[in-house]
Amino acid sequence: MVDQPVDAVEKVLGELPTPRFVTVEDVRLAVRAVVVHAPEEWPAGPLCRSDRTPYPCLLHRWGRRVLRSRGLPDEVVDELVARGDQLVHVPNRRR
């Protein structure tokens, strides 16, 4: 996994700072960030599913750093992202 800015805007703005003291709310936001900003395969390579920037996007990287700071290994986060992907593509129900 790359923890470097890859988007032109990110190169100017830099990375989002990791909170000095990670709260429960920070962890919730980080989980949401890695699930919502998961990779999606495109002909040009993986892009963020949410904002279509090169993967990993700014928010996905921030979420991973926050979760790492709380002791979650990348393998656990990868599994979370894979399971979260199933929830994003819920089919519409017809009535």
Image (cartoon, rainbow, N blue to C red):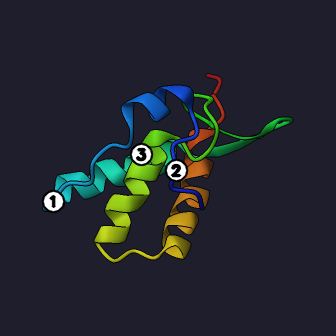
Q: Position of residue 58 (x, y in %)?
A: 46, 41
Which circle marks residue 33 in the picture? Answer: 3
Q: Is residue 57 left or right of residue 45?
A: left
The residue sitting at 30% across, 69% down in the picture is: 69
Q: Nearer the viewer, residue 29 or 92?
A: 29
Q: Is residue 17 left or right of residue 63?
A: left
Location of residue 74 with respect to 46 vertically, above or below: below
Helix, strand or loop at mark 3: helix
Q: Position of residue 27 (x, y in %)?
A: 27, 58
| Location of mark 2 (residue) | 4
Q: Earlier in the sequence, mark 2 or mark 3?
A: 2
| Location of mark 1 (residue) | 20
Task: Give the residue type that dot 2 points to.
Answer: Gln
Residue at the extreme top of the image, as rendered:
95
Helix, strand or loop at mark 2: loop
Q: Position of residue 77 (x, y in %)?
A: 49, 66
